[in-house]
Image (spheres, coloured by chain):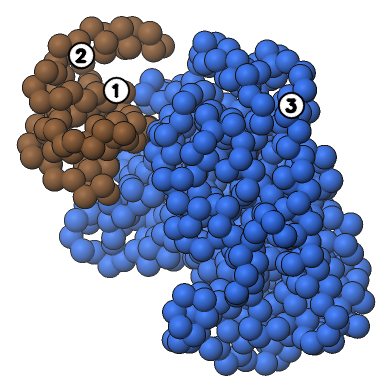
Chain colours: A blue, B brown
Amino acid sequence: MADQITDEQMFSGSEILLKSLIAEGVDTIFGYPGGQIMPTYDKLYDYQKELRHILVRHEQGAIHAAQGYARAKGIPGVVTVTSGPGATNVITGVADAMIDSTPVVVIAGQVATHLLGTDAFQETDVIGLTTPITKWSYQIRRVEDIQWAVARAFYIASTGRPGPVVLDFTATAQKGKAAFNYEKCNFIRSYHPYPEIEEKAVRKAAKMINEAKKPFLVFGQGIILSGAEKELQALVEKGEIPCASTLLGLSALPDGFPLYKGMVGMHGNIAPNVMTQECDLLIAVGMRFDDRVTGNTATYAIQARKIHIDIDESEFNKVIPVDLGVLGDAKAVLPMITELIEKKPREDWGLTSTICDAVEKHRVIDPEIHPESGEIHMGEVVDTLAEVSGKNALIVTDVGQNQMLGARYSRFNQTRSMITSGGLGTMGFGLPAAIGAKVGRPDRQVCCLVGDGGIQMVIQELGTIMQERTGVKIVLLNNNWLGNVRMWQELFYDQRYSSTRMINPDYSQIASAYGIRYRMVDKREELREAVEEMLSDDMPYILETHVLEEGMVFPMIPPGKNVNEIMLNNDDWFDYGE
Amino acid sequence: MENNEHLFVVSVYSENQVGLLGAIANAFTRRSLNIETLNVEPSEFEGVHRFTFKTRTTLDKVESIVKHIEKKVDVLKAFYYVDNEYLVKEHDILASYIDKHKR
């Protein structure tokens, strides 16, 4: 066949890669050029109309931006970087994407094949480094393998439980010549992303739900990844099952949905954590029992029978032993269960959440978001943002107190509105992820909640915002501390504040250097008006808020405690009797 | 959960891809398990390789390892057996698997 193809029908490996990306529907790449990926960047010059390249300021920014893009849009984010340091600089984001099930495809340059294993300039063992933190990684050594590898990469990254894929793209393959005849991949014999659903398990799940007097459902990001928001609503409505979200499941159900009881976990709401310990049936959907959710695993929902619905079989019994695992895609499994469950009266345990909610509002929420005097609180800023944006903003957080308060006090009207680094807890995630989210969803108001620690880890990405005019709204919650670590030092390390005090630069000058509009607020009376001003158009904006320096995040289940052992403040614990 | 340690045999059937041994061995390393013996060879099925590990651990851990390994894209099937009771049904299971997922 090869001898029938004329020279005009032959393309370089670099061009084949770009044409393959276009065939997969890619129109945006986040990246940074360098030696061993230069042939591909050279070809990219010819494809600027089809492929928008966002030049970040550090490869870590590229991978986090691709993660934000993927999570906002629901399709894989694409990253191109060079070999050696380019590749190693994306490692954190690849690990983050793995643990948070985010579809990204990373294409890293690699030295020519004859130099592999010789410690050539900017050579590193990318496959060896990324194997444990990718869904699949592959070294493309021959030009003939490019289309096969790209097709597999997109299929693997985006199907089943999504995840990152790394392609280690040798200079030899980039410079070789081959014909282009792209075929999408939809079958790999050793990979079954959508397992057949066992009807027996579905019937058993429905039976367990029908037998339950106090069922309780906890859902995770699996609902969003599967697009099963409506199916989830239908199930809990028919069964009258109260439900709660994990950190990554937030925004799957709209604010005010009557059966929704809030967020579980360490800084979650009191009611769903207490209900976990009171239900007689726990239904977990698309979540993985993270230790920040379960607290002490030995006592977690010990009284309840448990059903775990997940697309990844290796999650069953990994952390919490369950009575029944239902393997499958939530979008397919949930309606099958809904059909079989009966509408029936449940034991009235609404009182549990009423009591818990009242205590939380009075003891925690009101003092945090409606303080009468003193400095601005972080939660107050988040609450104001939710109010002014009409609950329509897409919130991207960094990691730490900004994240926990962002999760607690943001309110969402639509799905895919909360992007945060959950499993890996990567500081520096927020700003670049917000850039990616805004690039992917220019129609949405994207707000980045970030602390003074996190923004400085990736502050160079303000350059990307400047160059691309990405309309990200940066809400900088400045407390001059690494706030979350400081809080733990106060609570658990005898107030020995080791290396957590931060001297900050003058952010107004930084904003001005990057040509980004800026405003500082340190007075409560100005907060609302400042947020309104920030959201009044679609241009980048930095709103620096000087917040209470020793702010805390409550309620809190201290690490290793049972999920109903909840601190309301430094001295008081939640007590039913109140 | 059972917490007694046994010597387990873990056998893994995979496509013939570079780097898979490392990927599979990682599942043991992450759980701080020693691999007592390791054998890699072509299986009786064309293009399919077999890895045989022996490791001393608990039932819970070996179950989680096997599920973890089977999740790898290029792994067809993974099994575990207590001590040497293995190889009994592997051939039949794999033959029907390959038959079912033919394209």
Residue at image x 89%, y 64%? A388
Vertical arrangement, residue A360 with respect to residue B13, above or below = below
Residue A528 spot, x, y in % from top left = 89, 74
Marks 1 and 3 belong to one chain: no
Question: Who is closer to the viewer here, A133 or A258?
Answer: A258
Coordinates of residue A413 in the picture (x, y in percent): 83, 47
Q: What is the three-letter code of the residue carrying label 2?
A: Glu
Left or right of A454? Residue B61 is left
Question: In the rendered image, which residue does mark 1 sit on?
Answer: B77
Q: Which residue is mark 3?
A: A346
Question: Mark 3, residues whose alpha carbon is within 10 Å: few (<14), some, or many (≥20)?
Answer: some
Q: Residue at 52% of width from left, 76% of height from top?
A: A491
State the image coordinates of residue A531 (x, y, percent, origin top left). Answer: 86, 73
Q: Is residue A252 left or right of residue B59?
A: right
Which one is in front, A350 or A255? A350
- Gap between marks 3 and 2, in whole Å? 48 Å
Q: Residues within 10 Å of mark 2 (few under 14, many from 20)?
A: some
| Tags 2 and 1 on a common chain | yes
At a point 82% along the width and 40% down the height, the residue shown is: A258
